[in-house]
């Protein structure tokens, strides 16, 4: 469905009204609306209206602007307004009242960040155990590189790479195991080996059997936006308004999953930084992250070590992009993103914990 009105929460803050000692019943403590049912609230909305290619934006402050025309337009998107505040379900057994870190394990010889150093199962398992020690609550295991221009690998090769790692980490850690794959056969075998999340960068569009396989598994899923196939996706990506086009796509994929029998409570959406997007698209999506809460599902952000950071700061080597990755992670959690996909788990956890304490204004009671 293509919408004409979208709502992006803005003025996002950690709600600390409980510490304000207002006991005058005539002056109720003002609260914003809770963002995705979590600890953050929002005080205003950017109302985005799209007509024949152009997007107009007007910011309205909650509470006093709903009487005006733009307020009425916001109410025309009442379904989005409701989703922006609704409480999110637990995902793969994890509550999402605080940001969760998904550690990346690339079992690929051509991985853009690992340089193939984890290309055998034992090294990958050891790497995964280290990520868990560092605080990863989810491990995302992939055997096919999705970096721009990457070639596809056969089902057999992908299975050979990921299954022993899933089995090993399932036996040795309590982390939730996610499999990063676009192939139905890999999904089925990964589920049998102990995977608890299916992360598909094609949002179940690459393999015609994958959506049915996902529904059959009963597992929670991550739906990512990508324009085109990894091999050619960054050649010439085209959008009307990238932030809104990504929203439309994710909304349609959420609907497709629900129609196939996957409950909405088991779906996470991801705007897909770097997937069929130039630098100006990626930064626009980063600035638009809070809009995606209108989908009514948790949001996952994966910007770790990506080219966007290299382009912004002129850093060629992926391993040298850690500070920029942390900046992206914090931009994400400050916009209410619930899951951050990261290579550098220890650093990401530390950055998030410090941000949370500073946003909450207390070092206590954050669990
Ligand atoms: C596999 N993979 C690589 N980058 C990713 C991202 O940004 N999100 C998700 N969900 N998966 C990704």
Image (tube, grey):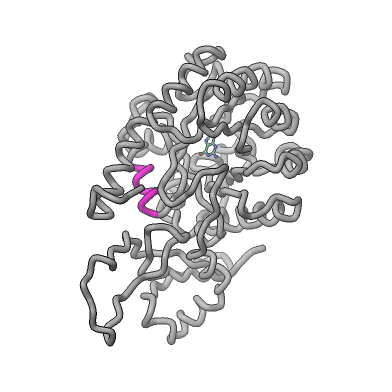
Query: Magenta includes 332?
Result: yes
Which residue is drawn at the image coordinates 70% and 50% (left, top)? Answer: 262
- x and y, in percent, of residue 243 in the image: 50, 56
Q: Is residue 249 left or right of residue 139?
A: right
Relative placement, left or right, of 324 versus 275 is left
Residue 96, horizontal then vertical, whole percent? 47, 49
Q: Which residues are magenta?
A: 327-335
Q: Position of residue 38 (x, y in %)?
A: 42, 58
Q: Position of residue 120 (x, y in %)?
A: 55, 12
Observer able to see residue 306: no
Q: Quadrant of residue 17?
A: bottom left
Residue at image position (53%, 48%) is 271
* Residue at horizontal 56 percent and vertical 53 percent from the top: 246
**Position of 193 relative to 365 (above/below):** above
Compared to 299, does 62 lie above or below?
below
Residue at the location (61% across, 45% down)? 223
Q: Nearer the viewer, residue 115 or 239?
A: 115
Q: Is residue 216 magenta?
A: no
């Amino acid at each position: 469905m293509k919408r004409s009105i979208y709502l992006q929460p803005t003025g996002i803050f950690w709600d600390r009204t409980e510490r304000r000692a207002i006991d005058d019943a005539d002056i109720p403590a003002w609260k914003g609306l809770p963002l995705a049912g979590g600890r953050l609230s929002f005080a205003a909305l950017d109302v985005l209206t799209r007509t024949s290619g152009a997007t107009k934006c007007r910011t309205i402050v909650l509470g006093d602007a709903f009487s005006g025309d733009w307020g009425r337009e916001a109410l025309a998107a009442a379904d989005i307004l409701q989703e922006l505040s609704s409480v999110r379900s637990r995902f793969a057994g994890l509550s999402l009242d605080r940001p969760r870190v998904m550690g990346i394990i690339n079992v690929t010889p051509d991985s853009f960040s690992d340089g193939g150093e984890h290309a055998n199962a034992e090294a990958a398992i050891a790497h995964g155990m280290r990520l868990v020690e560092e605080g990863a609550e989810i491990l995302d295991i992939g055997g096919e590189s999705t970096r721009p221009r990457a070639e596809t690998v056969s089902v057999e090769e992908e299975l050979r790479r990921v299954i022993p790692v899933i089995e090993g980490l399932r036996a040795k850690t309590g982390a939730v195991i996610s499999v990063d794959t676009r192939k139905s056969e890999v999904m089925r075998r990964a589920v049998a080996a102990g995977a608890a999340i299916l992360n598909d960068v094609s949002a179940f569009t690459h393999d015609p059997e994958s959506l049915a396989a996902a529904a059959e598994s009963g597992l929670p899923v991550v739906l990512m936006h990508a324009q085109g196939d990894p091999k050619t996706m960054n050649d010439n990506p085209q959008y009307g308004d990238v932030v809104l086009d990504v929203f439309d796509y994710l909304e349609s994929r959420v609907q497709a999953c629900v129609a196939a029998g996957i409950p909405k409570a088991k779906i996470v959406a991801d705007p897909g930084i770097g997937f069929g997007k130039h630098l100006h698209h990626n930064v626009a999506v980063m600035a638009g992250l809070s809009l995606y809460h209108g989908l009514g599902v948790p949001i996952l952000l994966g910007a770790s070590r990506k080219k966007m950071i290299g382009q912004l700061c002129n850093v060629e080597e992926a391993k040298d992009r850690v500070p920029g990755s942390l900046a992206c992670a914090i931009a994400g959690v400050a916009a209410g993103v619930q899951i951050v996909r990261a290579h550098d788990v220890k650093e990401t956890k530390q950055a998030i914990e410090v941000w949370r304490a500073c946003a909450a204004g207390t070092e206590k009671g954050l669990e």
